[in-house]
């Protein structure tokens, strides 16, 4: 029995390039979602503080925390699915956008909410 050369590997599949425009679109979508979450949380705190029950302002803080968790789950899930199955640029942009904005937006949003709640009687 003689040795034979193995067949060549199959040709590579269609390449899926990462488009810069799509990456920036994903980053922009996440930043917009973070801004909306902060505005909703701060708005809920302001409305809650204007009510007769002072504990209603804390509901806005919890709303802010819940929205941040929802943004995290959505970015992680949709980002990974898009990287694997669809447009890699948009999925990568979602993950980059969340990673960059998670350090700033939740801290600012929750900080503003807590400042409003703690200064309720002083306004």
Image: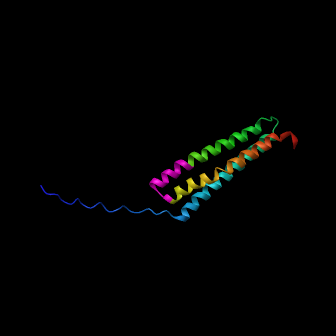
Q: Is residue 55 above or below residue 72?
A: above
Q: Is residue 36 above or below residue 60?
A: below
The answer to which quarter of the image holds residue 14 is bottom left
Locate the C terminus and report the quarter of the image it occupies.
top right
Q: Residue at x 41, y 63 (%)?
A: 15
The answer to which quarter of the image holds residue 94 is bottom right
> Can you name the residue that lies furthest to the front here?
2
User: Which percent across, then down, holds residue 88?
Assistant: 49, 58
Q: Is residue 65 visible?
A: yes
Compare residues 109 and 8 and report the one nearer the observer.
8
Which stretch is magenta? 75-88
Q: Residue at x 74, y 38 (%)?
A: 58
> Can you name the residue that lies furthest to the right here?
122
> Would you say the magenta stretch is mainly helix, strand or loop?
helix
User: Which percent across, then down, holds residue 98?
Assistant: 60, 52
User: Which percent across, then down, holds residue 40?
Assistant: 71, 47
Compare residues 52 and 11 and report the one nearer the observer.
11
> Can you name the residue that lies furthest to the left here?
1
**Colouring style:** rainbow
Locate the N terminus and report the quarter of the image it occupies.
bottom left
Q: Is residue 1 magenta?
A: no
Q: Is residue 82 magenta?
A: yes
User: Which percent across, then down, holds residue 113?
Assistant: 75, 44
Compare residues 2 and 83 and report the one nearer the observer.
2
Q: Residue at x 54, y 62 (%)?
A: 22
Q: 1 left or right of 117? A: left
The answer to which quarter of the image holds residue 73 is top right
Q: Residue at x 53, y 56 (%)?
A: 92
Q: Is residue 23 above or below residue 64?
A: below
Q: Is residue 43 visible?
A: no
The number of numbered badges drawn on the structure is 0
């Amino acid at each position: 029995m003689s040795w034979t050369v193995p067949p060549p590997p199959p040709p590579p599949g269609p390449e899926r390039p990462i488009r810069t425009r799509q990456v920036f679109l994903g980053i922009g979508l996440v930043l917009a979602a973070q801004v909306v979450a902060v505005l909703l949380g701060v708005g809920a705190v302001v409305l809650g503080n204007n009510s007769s029950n002072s504990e209603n302002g804390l509901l806005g803080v919890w709303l802010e925390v819940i929205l941040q968790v929802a943004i995290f789950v959505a970015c992680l899930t949709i980002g990974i699915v898009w990287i694997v199955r669809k447009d890699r640029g948009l999925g990568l942009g979602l993950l980059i956008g969340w990673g960059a904005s998670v350090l700033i937006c939740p801290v600012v949003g929750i900080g503003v909410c807590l400042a409003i709640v703690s200064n309720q009687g002083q306004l």
